[in-house]
């Protein structure tokens, strides 16, 4: 008769001990989404401090576990990213897809991975205005980027092809009023 009650008691004891051990574990760190974040009218550029919404053209952002850094242009974000001290983190980089956004007010629902985007560089004579420095157009679709580049005699670059020299040359060709 004692064996009849002993087996369920042992099972219950094992279950209780298991629950205690699970409860003692440190809570699992919640995985924070590193997805793109919407821009707001009061957002300031991480680099220059200007109000981002005051400028047309593609915007950019770097999202990591601790902060979101927003930029008034794709060129500002690329210039920031090219600094060695900024490449050590695990930030995800985003730019507007100008193939699906209007230049004057890019749509935040069309933010794309900046590392897989196509960039049109050399738009100084295009009439497309942006923030300070180089005006770059970012695209998810290579054909859309090539079409804009052909219209304006510009070039298409991939993320890894853009360096400080590319940004400086593009900025130097911008009209003085845009600097």
Image (cartoon, helix red, strand yellow):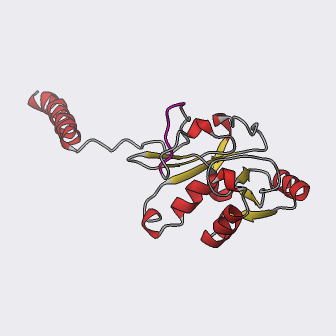
Q: Nearest the camera: 24 or 66?
A: 66
Counting every numbered tag in the picture gives: 0
Q: Residue at x 41, y 46 (%)?
A: 67
- The quadrant the C terminus occupies is bottom right
The outermost residue toward the bottom is 165
User: Can you give x and y, in whole percent of width and height, for residue 155 in the image?
Assistant: 81, 64
29 relative to 144 in the view: left or right: left
- The quadrant the N terminus occupies is top left
The outermost residue toward the left is 2
Q: Nearest the camera: 31 or 173?
A: 173
User: Can you give x and y, in whole percent of width and height, for residue 87 in the image?
Assistant: 47, 65
Check if residue 108 falls in the magenta segment: no
User: Can you give x and y, in whole percent of width and height, for residue 36 in the image?
Assistant: 56, 42
Q: Which residue is drawn at 52% across and 60% down?
A: 80
User: Can you give x and y, in whole percent of width and height, for residue 75 in the image?
Assistant: 62, 56
Q: Residue at x 49, y 41 (%)?
A: 44
Residue 165 vertical position relative to residue 7 in the rendered view, above or below:
below
Check if residue 43 falls in the magenta segment: yes
Q: Nearest the camera: 53 or 91?
A: 53
136 relative to 34 in the view: left or right: right
The outermost residue toward the front is 176
Q: Nearest the camera: 96 or 45?
A: 45
Residue numbers of the magenta segment: 41-46
Residue 53 vertical position relative to residue 49 in the rendered view, above or below:
above
Residue 155 vertical position relative to residue 2 in the rendered view, above or below:
below
Q: Main secondary structure of the magenta part?
A: loop
Q: Residue 162's quadrant in the figure?
A: bottom right
Q: Which residue is drawn at 56% across and 55% down?
A: 77
């Amino acid at each position: 008769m004692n064996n009849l009650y002993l087996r369920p008691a042992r099972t219950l004891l094992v279950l209780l001990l298991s629950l205690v051990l699970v409860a003692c574990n440190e809570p699992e760190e919640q995985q924070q989404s590193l997805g793109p974040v919407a821009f707001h009218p009061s957002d300031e550029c991480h680099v220059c401090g200007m109000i981002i919404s005051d400028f047309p053209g593609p915007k950019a952002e770097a999202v990591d576990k601790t902060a979101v850094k927003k930029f008034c242009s794709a060129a500002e974000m690329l210039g920031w990213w090219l600094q060695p001290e900024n490449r050590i983190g695990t930030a995800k980089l985003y730019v507007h897809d100008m193939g699906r956004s209007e230049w004057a007010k890019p749509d935040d629902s069309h933010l794309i991975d900046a590392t897989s985007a196509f960039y049109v560089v050399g738009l100084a004579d295009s009439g497309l205005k942006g923030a300070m420095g180089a005006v770059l157009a970012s695209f998810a679709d290579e054909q859309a980027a090539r079409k804009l580049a052909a219209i304006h005699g510009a070039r298409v670059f991939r993320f890894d092809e853009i360096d400080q020299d590319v940004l400086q040359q593009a900025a130097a060709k911008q009209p003085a009023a845009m600097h």
